[in-house]
Image (spheres, coloured by chain):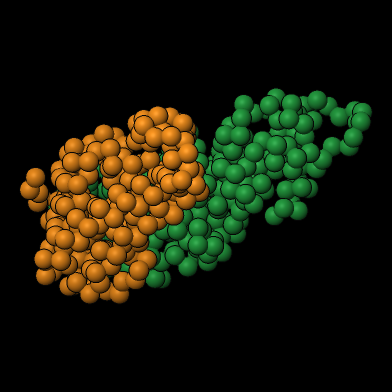
Chain colours: A orange, B green
Amino acid sequence: MVAEHGFQAIETASVCARAQVSGAHFDRCFADLEDCFLAIHDEALEELCERVRAVSAERESWHDRLWAAGTAAMRFLRENPVRARFLVVSVSGSGDGAAGRRDRVVGRIADILDGGRGEGAGEGERRRSRCTAEIAAGAVYNTLFCKIEGGAVERGEEFLPELIYLATMPYLGQRVAEDELAVQPLR
Amino acid sequence: MAGEKENASPRLPAGRHGLPREFVVQNQRERIVTALVDVVAERGYNATTVANITKAASVSRRTFYEHFDDKEACFLAAYEMVAEHIAASMRAAAEAFEDWPQQVRAALATMLAFLAGEPELARLMMVEPVAAGGEIAARHRASMQGLIAILKAGRPEHAGARPLPEATEEALVGGIVSLVVREISAGRSRELERLLPDLVELTLAPYIGAEQAERLARS
């Protein structure tokens, strides 16, 4: 319902009616609607991270892990368009906890990107900080937000090279990162 | 800042004051907007009520609704006012330089300096729109167009083998905003200016290359 109408437009009663549970049952499970939203957000994010972890662990290099993680994430979002919208777009306007959840998603992306420190050679080989990872992760998240909000989630793999370009550019340098844009991702 | 705001829009004397109606109306509107900024800084947008705002502004509920349809409209009025000020300052700072990389650096420095100097407004402008959503979040995204335009002006500087992806500027501004929001949320608004070198370097790198961007950022 949040993905369909936005958090501000829904009420506990309509959520209970859709879920076919009583108000009392809802109250036993959650403090309020925001608490319910945040719990589902946590669950969906954990599932996405689990998928990403499973494929990334098999790859040796940071670059390969990045592609594997990106491919798995895009597949998850394409296969679960409602959860994709919920995870990335609906978090805006979902109460005071929303900013924290948005930060958590960006933080998880930054964790992966931060592994790129020391990966570069030549142009990209310079000191990098956690700040670098967080700016790049914010850029990736913003691109995802725009694509999902614009209804392009079913073409997730198509814009993966653009995301990988944004993610690798600070670490590998502009010239190497540009090559990512020419990659045809597997669907 | 609170003192300056009170001076800018003092409460009118009670009873028949003989002041022109236009002045009274403008004064009331400014007081309401100023009150919203204070209340939102204290309680957050979602927990703020019209009653909180009218009490802080010392105006009646009726007066509030003469000026604004609802709390969201009042917030947007405050947001627009500050956004226009920041955008104008950034443009002026950029125009002081001829070369584009310096323009970007100046614009970013101006934005960070403003937000660092006004922590309450920084929260109102950068953090609250995410929690508020709807029209406010949409307006917040639209307000980034000024910075996006400054970055887009750097496309002719790009010497790469492939054209930059169409959404590069939007992504870069998203990265900048994301980090700034994170710092403000963590209570580090006053330290925002220390982010400048990293922000400048990563923003310029796609256009002028990492080495030149780093030199300029750390200079």
| Nearer-the-camera pick, B68 or B89 | B68
Residue B8 in the figure: left or right of residue A129: right
Q: Position of residue A89 (x, y in %)?
A: 35, 41
| Nearer-the-camera pick, A98 or B72 | A98
Q: Position of residue A74 (x, y in %)?
A: 19, 47
Where is B128 relative to A137, above or below? above
Where is A60 relative to A148, above or below? below
| Nearer-the-camera pick, B38 or B172 | B38
Residue at image position (66%, 35%) is: B50
Residue B76 in the figure: left or right of residue A152: right
Residue B164 in the figure: left or right of residue A31: left
Quadrant location of the C terminus of chain A in the rendered image: top left
Quadrant location of the N terminus of chain A in the rendered image: top left
Residue at image position (25%, 57%) is: A49
Q: Quadrant of residue A155?
A: top left
Where is B16 relative to A82, above or below? above
Q: Quadrant of residue B55?
A: top right
Q: Position of residue A152 (x, y in %)?
A: 23, 36
Q: Is residue A10 visible?
A: no
Q: Position of residue B30 (x, y in %)?
A: 71, 38
Residue at image position (62%, 46%) is: B40
Residue at image position (22%, 75%) is: A118
